Amino acid sequence: MLVAVRFAPLLILILSFATGSAWAQGAFDFAAVEAQAQKLASQPYQDVQPIGGEMKKLGYDQYRALRTKPDTALWRDSGLFRVEFFPAGFIYDRPVNIGVVENGNVTPVVIGSGQFDFSDTGLKEPPKDLALAGFKVTFPLNHPDKFDEVIAFLGASYFRQVGRGQNYGSSARGLAIDTATNRPEEFPAFRSFWLVKPAANATELTVWALLDSPGAAGAFSFVIRPGSRTVVETKAILFLRHDVSLLAIAPLTSMYFAGKRSPPRDDYRPEIHDADGLFMLTGHEERIWRPLTNPSALAISSYSDNNPRGFGLMQRERSFEQYQDSTARVETRPSLWVEPIGDWGDGEVRLVEIPSKAETNDNIVAFWVPRWPARQGGRMEYGYRLSALIDDEALSPQARVVATRGGAVPNDDKARRIVAEFAGGELSTLQPGQPVEAQVTLSSGKLLRSYVEALPWQKSWRLFIDFQPDGKKPVDMRAQLKLRGKVLTETFSDVYRP
């Protein structure tokens, strides 16, 4: 299992797509993309040769310094959407093809050095030939007269999106294969993109993409709707080139370096993370919160479900005081929420937490794993809405976990304590004297005691769980707060690993 670097996912496998029927005129639609994916999966996998030259030699800071000239953006003279392109370079060294679809006709996008400002890259002169690596979409998201970036596709099948008042944080991927298994992980890559030209007054943009990897090929449709919650309605049609041991659907990637339960650090910032928990809405309407950690060893957690209603990596803590980072402004980074369209059947939400010694690593991954096997020659289809949001309290009508802490139990060196703080919902209206009680279960070890404490000045309640682990066995715990038998909170789920 590899940690994906924040500014550059490792093992980027973007492939080029041979011209031909892809750019046929007069009748190109998403069905044509699906047909190409099916044909691609029937053939042996072929990687693409990376670019060379000065663009390949650029470092991280040099590549970031490369700027698109605003007057060269696609659709700059009309409509609410504009598109700017990323040239192949740095580690984004495998070209992709991009076409514009209008009335069924496809026009290939070609870029030149005149579209970019190379003045801060350190290059003596602009390169003569440039290839495409990806693109970003801008829209008047925050101000009517300013075009803000709302989504970017760059690197393997990675993309990032933001809503109003948000800054880039967690990422999504089109597909992941064999993540955190005993097999080498595959990083499927988008090989080609098609931008469907929107009407002048359109508030949504459609993008089609062709994905390929040694294990699978796929056709993707993204309908992008910018707003306070920028929503990307996604359809993924996958064709299996060979049997796949683990097919990860709607994968999300984030960073969790330090939080309330982290060991003391020599850092003025109390917490450093783009997401602090995994939130799930199960098929039987149970809401589950699982706080994230930066573990000492690779940790994998699975939550079985049938027809899930949603899952996502959430950034619940929204106060600057919790981070004290005036540059990164991580409190403005969005939660990413996956909402399945239709029934996904049996499977599990899987969470992977990877040890990280640097905040530049994306060390958190969450995705859906279908129960049925992914066999060679099979076709699989998934639809879902992916939302970038900061109003995730709207997903939790019950009281929700707002903080998780942990430590030792005083005067008992064999016991541990987990403290979960709940707020919101009906719980916030209760006086301290109300007989709120906890329901706690452990998978192993011994529950010593649990009790509830009101914090009226914060309109919240704390649950204390004292337990004694059984040797080196992990302790899975679940807890809810109740009042006279009525459940008041989402389910708190956590794992203590001795």
Image (spheres, rainbow, N blue to C red):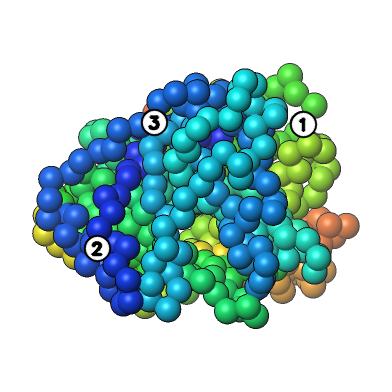
Dot 3, how many residues are within 10 Å of its Cα: few (below 14), some (14-19), or many (20+)?
some
- The residue singled out by tag 1 in the image is 269
Q: Nearer the N terminus, badge 1 or badge 2?
A: 2
Query: Three-letter amino acid code at disc 3?
Result: Ile
Residue at 43% from the left image edge and 69% from the top image edge: 101
The answer to which of 399 and 248 lies nearer the viewer is: 248
Q: Is residue 227 left or right of residue 378?
A: right
The quadrant of the picture occupied by the N terminus is top left
Query: Three-letter amino acid code at disc 2?
Result: Ser
Residue at 77% from the left image edge and 31% from the top image edge: 269
Q: Secondary structure at mark 3?
A: loop
Gap in Å between the C-alphas at discs 1 and 2? 54 Å
Can see residue 209? yes
Residue at 50% from the left image edge and 23% from the top image edge: 54
Q: Quadrant of residue 433?
A: bottom right
Q: Exactly how many numbered labels are in the figure?
A: 3
Determine contact: label 2, label 3, CB under 8 Å.
Answer: no
Gap in Å between the C-alphas at discs 3 and 1? 40 Å
Residue 389 x %, y %: 64, 62
- The residue singled out by tag 3 in the image is 51
Q: Nearer the N terminus, badge 3 or badge 1?
A: 3
Q: Nearer the N terminus, badge 2 or badge 3?
A: 2
Q: Secondary structure at mark 2?
A: helix
Residue 324 x %, y %: 81, 37
Residue 326 x %, y %: 82, 38
- The residue singled out by tag 2 in the image is 21
Dot 2, how many residues are within 10 Å of its Cα: few (below 14), some (14-19), or many (20+)?
few
Gap in Å between the C-alphas at discs 2 and 3? 24 Å
